[in-house]
Image (spheres, helix red, strand yellow):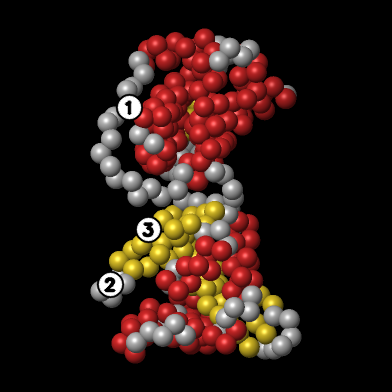
Amino acid sequence: MTSPRIRLARPAEAAEISSLAIRSKAHWGYTPAQMKRFAEELTLTSDLLALRDAHVLEAEGSIVGFYTLVPHGGASVELEHLFVEPDLLRGGFGAKLLQHARERAAERGFLRMVIQSDPNAEGFYRAHGAELVMNIPTSIPGRTLPLMDLRLWAVDRQQIHRTIRDFLDLIEGEASVADREARLALLLDRLALAQHFAGPSVDRADYPEAPRRNADELRSRVCERFPNYGFYNLPEAVVENIGESSCVVGDAIDDLAEIAADLYEIEWYWSNTGEENALRYLQLSYRTHWQEHLRGLQLYLKALDSAAER
């Protein structure tokens, strides 16, 4: 066999790709009734294929494998399909396709890959760094699918915790004002990145609520630590009334205090309820509250840097 190459799939190849997927699925010994159901799920029309980031593995003019990617929300992408001709399994072709899919997804800016694996392929994905999140029940009684998570950029939980503590050190520590300001922009970037790697949590225990810091005292503390920061302009409507939107006033001190308040709670959860619950609250509080403060603060710091360069 000539050296295979990976290229973009063409919509006209939908039927050939679908047949390959069904043949590969049948390799695992499923019953005719199960395969009838799987065939419906695995059949891709040309229109459906055109909507996916699909690549095929081609050798000697024939398609011998393929994968498809679809956005999964936020910074996640789903590996919707990855199949290889049955007689080529365990020949390294699946690994070649998965590596290409990882690189493709990372180039497009995704941070993690979600995989609903066939149970027979779970070991393959584990061998390539994927972690089991949970087993999902299917329409077939007694059958579950492994839901797996594959990180495209490596940020572990220890690094996430360190980022939270480093940010709170800006509030509690005794560094100079100049040093705090120099460190802040990078820490905001690290916090924004960290929440993508918190991972889906299956911990649903009923934990006590973290104590909330006194808002006035925290704001006063932030004022002392960042005396050079103040108010800034933000558009009132970001995607409406383009060019005509009025401004609202942002407050860098308020942004810092609100972010810190949530991070103090996350740190409390980490120490008192465990990292799973802390990471769950990290994602929840970011999406519902302090993301807006972080993004506004990043724009403010960028404007300050630009003004200093003029």
Quick one: label 2 or label 3, which is nearer the N terminus?
3
Q: Report the residue marked by disc 2.
A: 142
Tell me if residue 225 can be seen: yes
Amino acid type at mark 1: Ala
Crowdedness of circle 2 by 10 Å Cα count: few (<14), some, many (20+)?
few
Label for residue 134?
A: 3
The amino acid type found where label 3 is placed reads: Met
Spot occupied by residue 292 in the image (x, y as percentages of width and height): 44, 34
Label 2 SS:
loop
Please name the residue shown 41% across and 29% down the image. 271
Distance (Cα) linking label 2 and label 3:
15 Å
Q: In this rendering, is residue 111 above or below 88?
A: above
> Does the image show residue 9?
no
- Location of the C terminus by quadrant is top right
The reply to whether the C-beta atoms of the residues labelled 3 and 1 are less than 8 Å apart is no
Residue 91 as seen in the image, left or right of residue 139:
right
Residue 84 pos. (x, y %): 56, 80
Q: Where 72 sits versus 272, above or below?
A: below
Q: Return the x and y of residue 301 as percentages of the image width and height.
A: 59, 27
Disc sitting over residue 210 in the figure = 1
As measured in the structure, the alpha-carbon distance from the residue carrying label 1 to the one carrying label 2 is 39 Å
Labels 2 & 3 near each other (Cβ < 8 A): no
